[in-house]
Amino acid sequence: MSNLSLYLKAFARLKQGITKYGKAPHKPVFLLTLIELIEKGLDNDNHFLVNADLVGLFQENWRLLVTTAHQPDFTQPFYYLQSDQVDEQSFWFIHTHHGAPMQAHIKSVSTLASIVAYGSLSPQLYALLQSLENRKLIRNSILAHYFPNQLQYYYEHKQIGDGYYQDLQALVLNDPEVKYKHMVIHTEEDVFIRSHLFKRYIPQLYQDTCAMTGMQLRSTYNHNFIDACHIVPFSISHDDKVTNGLALCPNLHRAFDRGLVSVDQDYRILVSRHIRELGEHPYSLKKLEGTKIIIPKTEQYYPAPENLAWHRSEVFKEK
């Protein structure tokens, strides 16, 4: 029997928990998500990070495929898929930051992300999934076996790019079309995805440049040296749209959060009188006063005037 046949057979016999709603659909949805990440080039060379892409696409695929009352808990298949095997060998592995294996299922996606470095597929399966034809065969087999009634609906929405994750990305990017869609954001996964998208898009929109100093920092190791700063704190606004953000280097981020700098209605920098510094120092914050901040090229992504006004009123130490 070929390797592909072995995997097709195993994927039709995934271990599924039995619930009052029927067999748990989490593992097949998770496998479909891994295949999609590979297809989109988001797998980081068999390093599946617990990030917005993995969690967001899992949630999207769940909404397209699952019609029962099961809860879309991403952490379940991430952990329990380790127990499934092909030819008596596991094909899903979890790699933690500290190197020790995970001893138990962690239900919080944020906690999971802090503990797990990445997940990976067996080299054999990963090699198989590099083939477009193999991905089609495996995807179709999983869909036909576990979600036959939703197969056509799934492909239709994937083809037009209409789904939960696309909508969340559009929401964070302040797409005006999203306001016409009813989006309920209340689970930990929703908040996790939005937060990670905010942290991704803000540096991108500002070209990894601090909006106040103009300092641009990039790394060949993919380290991010520019912070995505909320103008109105998320704890108050629950707003992760890019219009509630600024790209700031860490020292300006701290100064902004503490009200030592702000931005006026014309996007010019305000500096608090309460700063004590060497005024003649080349990096003195006072030298920034009145300077116009760097803003994104597209008006849709500009910092919202009402958010900046809130910061001036509630945070900035003007007197």
Image: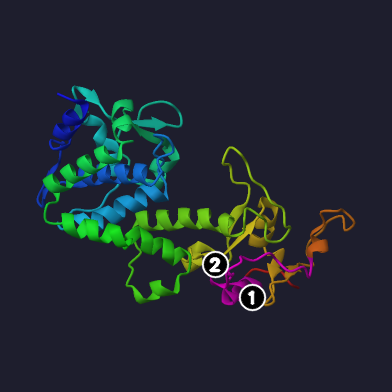
Seen in the image, is 54 located left or right of residue 278?
left
- Residue under pointer 1: 313
Q: How many marks?
A: 2
- Residue under pointer 2: 244
**Residue at x-position 36% and y-position 27%:** 101
Please tell me in which quadrant of the rendered image residue 290 appears.
bottom right
Who comes first in sequence, dot 2 or dot 1?
2
Report crowding for label 2: few under 14, some 14 to 19, many 20 or more residues within 10 A (C-alpha). Answer: many
- Name the disc covering residue 167, or none: none
Residue 310 located within the stretch drawn in magenta: yes
Image position of 312 with respect to 52: above or below: below
**Residue at x-position 25% and y-position 35%:** 81
Say which element carries label 2: helix
Q: Which residues are magenta?
A: 289-314
Say which element carries label 1: helix
Seen in the image, is 244 located left or right of residue 15?
right
* Residue farthest along the right direction in this orientation: 280
Where is residue 288 drawn, in percent x and y? 79, 63
Where is residue 118 drawn, in percent x and y? 41, 36
Please tell me in which quadrant of the rendered image residue 207 appears.
bottom right
**The N terminus lies in which quarter of the figure?**
top left
**The C terminus lies in which quarter of the figure?**
bottom right
* Residue farthest along the front direction in this orientation: 133
Q: CA distance from mark 2 to mark 1?
A: 15 Å
**Residue at x-position 70% and y-position 52%:** 251
Amino acid of disc 1: Ser
Please tell me in which quadrant of the rendered image residue 302 appears.
bottom right
Image position of 181 with respect to 191: above or below: below
